[in-house]
Image (cartoon, rainbow, N blue to C red):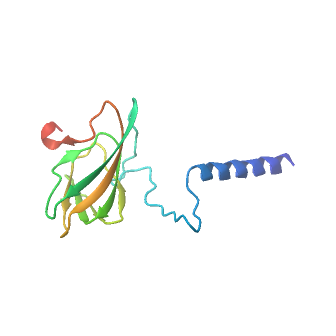
Amino acid sequence: MKLINNLFFGILFASISSLALSIDATEAVKVTPLLKTQKSWNGEAIVYPEGQAEVTVILIEVAPGGETGWHLHPVPSFAMVLEGELKVELKTGETLFLKAGDAAAEVVNVLHNGHNIGDVPVKLVVFYAGNSADKLTIGESDGK
């Protein structure tokens, strides 16, 4: 009986925990998972910085043929492409192609360059999980 009780409460707590982590789909609410990962797109583990947490969300627009320039992010960041097509390249030659609707965990402390390879502006929303003391982006010419 004790085993059955433990099993029941274990399932109950697991169910409550999973409900607390998401919004339930209903007839009025559609839920579409976009990204769930413990690693950035180059396979490195995501590690949150120490210090006072600060989340920043920005909209970035890159003109057709435009590039972001070589840069890195010292904090975890996550992007979702709203419009357009973006090629993201690492100095190693690894490449990630993103199009409207795609989401990605960006690389951390790795130089990369985004290039709009389409005919319309790329619009992407980027979420930074940083802290109040760190920069979000460092350009290649800034010393890294």
The spot of residue 101 in percent (x, y) is 36, 65
Q: Residue at x 24, y 44 (%)?
A: 72
In this rendering, position of residue 19 left or right of residue 74: right
104 versus 47 height, above or below: below
In the rendered image, the residue lying farthest to the right is 1
Q: Is residue 90 above or below residue 102?
A: above
Q: Can you tell which quarter of the image residue 117 is in?
A: bottom left
Asked if 67 appears above or below 74 in the picture, the reply is: below
Question: Could you tell whether 85 is left or right of 28 in the image?
Answer: left
Q: Nearer the viewer, residue 1 or 23?
A: 23
Residue at 52% across, 65% down: 30
Q: Quadrant of residue 27?
A: bottom right
**On the rendered structure, is 26 left or right of 69?**
right
Residue drawn at 72 percent across, 48 percent down: 10
Residue 14 place in picture, x, y as percent: 66, 50
Looking at this view, name the residue that lies furthest to the front: 28
At a point 37% along the width and 59% down the height, the residue shown is 103
Which of the two residues, 88 or 19, is positioned nearer the viewer here? 19
Depth order, front residue of 27/92: 27
Residue 139 image position (x, y, % from top left): 17, 42
Foreground residue among 135 and 56: 56
